[in-house]
Amino acid sequence: MLKDITLGQFFPGTSPIHRLDPRVKLLLALIFIVVLFVINNLVAYIIMGVLLAVVVKISQIPLGLVLKGLKPIFVVVIITAILNIFYNTTGEVLWEWGFLRVTTNGIMLGIFMAIRIVYLIIGVAIILTYTTSPILLTDAVENVFSPFKRFGFPAHEIAMMMTIAIRFIPTLVEETEKIINAQKARGADFETGSILKRAKALVPILVPLFVSAFKRADELAIAMECRCYQGGENRTRMRVLQTSRIDYVAIVITVLVCAALVSMNFMEFGWRA
Amino acid sequence: MKPFISFENLSFKYSEEEPRWVLENINLTIDDGSFVAVLGHNGSGKSTLAKHLNAILLPTEGKVYVDGIDTCDEEKLFDLRQRVGMVFQNPDNQIVATVVEEDVAFAPENLGVPPAEIRERVDWALEAVSMTEYREAASYHLSGGQKQRIAIAGVLAMKPKCIVLDEPTAMLDPQGRKEVMKTIRELNKNEGITIVMITHYMNEAIMADRVVVMDEGHVILDGDPYEVFSHVDELKSVGLDVPQPTELMYLLKGAGVDIEKTVLTDEECAEVLYNLLEGQR
Ligand SMILES: Nc1ncnc2c1ncn2[C@@H]1O[C@H](COP(=O)(O)OP(=O)(O)OP(=O)(O)O)[C@@H](O)[C@H]1O
Ligand SMILES: [Mg+2]
């Protein structure tokens, strides 16, 4: 179950997507998210889906990994879609039972929300994080937010926290699995009983996990001190972030495509909510 | 010549209230380029001593000098830490960044080294621990021995004069242990880096050119491995083992066999036994 967590992991490569400046990737991801929620035309969503598939192809991420990344959110997508179907009750009524009412607009909205979540995961969680090394991503965050340091915004600290969190996710997942197996071997039961009983069964997992996490934190802090860590002041980076032609090309393409997709909102065709 | 490291009447306790010293009146000097193994049973103060070498802990009484720097001198804290790299038991808790080469770059980045030179240092450090081919790997895909070598590369990138290792092989399988020991010896021989290594494994201790034995916060034995391991009774009385060949010779001696030499390795042991048997014919 925990092995399915592939989100937030990096797959090294040399594709054009891998080579983009991570700051540019962050910016493009932001534009993408905004546009994703502005669009309200099914044809536009289909075009966007095709383009996303093209980007996945260019980035050389295996299709299996994309599906694996989507699997954990499957339930969330279904629930969101259903809630949205019942939420919007304007338009032609198709089915009614008590206070529940399904309308054409409701169905459209449900489909749109499902598409939005799936695209969001593919675009941000998969394309962005799979093709960008965690350090570059956190460097980009630090770099983008560093103008706000003047006002006391802890850009470096946040970036360092992200780096460490990403680094320790697989370690802690592995450890959790070990603890679960150890408890199961002693006859612990996590799968049956009332919710309260199951929640109680988690205590013997969480306690050792937290104890170990604190110990790790302590040791890591000393190890960082030993390696001369002294905060963000006067720190240099091995890789200097640099924009190049490929970044400008990516920006131009993205902006044009997004403008086209948004303009479809004002056109008289396609299905919309 | 001034020794590279010197402890002068070092005494230490973790808090004022503690009745006993964790380290008491330690006097010890370590030469540049040497390979020192530190032995002692659990709680004898080995890790505490090691942490004095780069000012993670400061002496309660006495002084510690490393390469002429007083470890209490706050102005020179980062000069000191850059000279003395520290490697701990659990490699998982020392690696900061996910990707190998980015982790190795962490220390020189902290020191403000220019990017091009960081690149050089990282390549050199990975080469020195034979991990170049894993530059871009994620550390969680590596074996324990490989992770520990990455941790060593991580301190090597500071270009330290000395590396202190606190039970670096304790969590590793035999294969990983061998890899790490090989790396440590090569760094000592080829790069001339001073090594201070805490260990519980006697067959690792005999690779050093000096062995220091601690007990209850004191240094009780200090000398080359042959000398130290000739004190079998004393070592056993503080709860330590001796290498197996040494133990065998000790038992034979106890049984009345005439053996003068202290032996440490299997080869030496075989030779002594061979000569004994030859003599009997
Ligand atoms: N942070 C601490 N606070 C208080 N006491 C400590 C602390 N760390 C260690 N001690 C105590 O200091 C003594 C020496 O500990 P130290 O860790 O130096 O021993 P060690 O020789 O490294 O042992 P081991 O072989 O178990 O690693 C022990 O009695 C220990 O309980
Ligand atoms: Mg210790």
Image (cartoon, coloured by chain):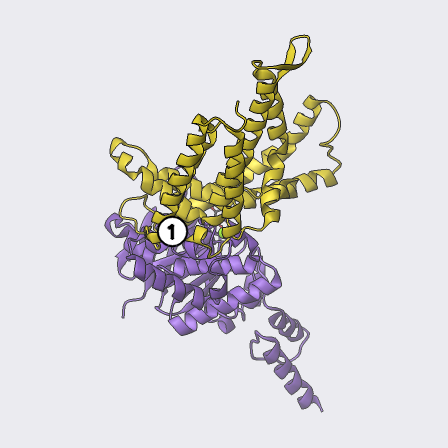
Chain colours: A yellow, B purple
Up the image or down, A92 lies above or below B182; here it is above
Q: Quadrant of residue B243?
A: bottom right
Q: Could you classify mark 1 by the number of other residues whose Cα lies within 10 Å: few (under 14), some (14-19), or many (20 or more)?
A: many
Does the rendering let one see residue A175?
A: no
Q: Residue furthest top?
A: A98
Point 42% across, 49% down: residue: A223
Up the image or down, A273 lies above or below A151; here it is above
Q: Which residue is mark 1?
A: A226
Point 33% across, 59% down: residue: B118
In-image side of B245 versus A193 (left or right): left
Q: Quadrant of residue A142?
A: top left
Q: Secondary structure at mark 1?
A: helix
In-image side of A234 versus A121 (left or right): left
Up the image or down, A146 lies above or below B264; here it is above
* Amino acid type shown at disc 1: Cys
Residue A92 position within the rendered picture, expressed as x and y whole percent measured from the top left? 60, 15
Residue B259 position within the rendered picture, expressed as x and y whole percent measured from the top left? 61, 80
Tag 1 subunit? A
Residue A134 position within the rendered picture, expressed as x and y whole percent measured from the top left? 45, 47
The front one of A92 and B29 is A92
The front one of B42 and A128 is A128
Up the image or down, B191 lies above or below B156; here it is below
Point 45% across, 27% down: residue: A267
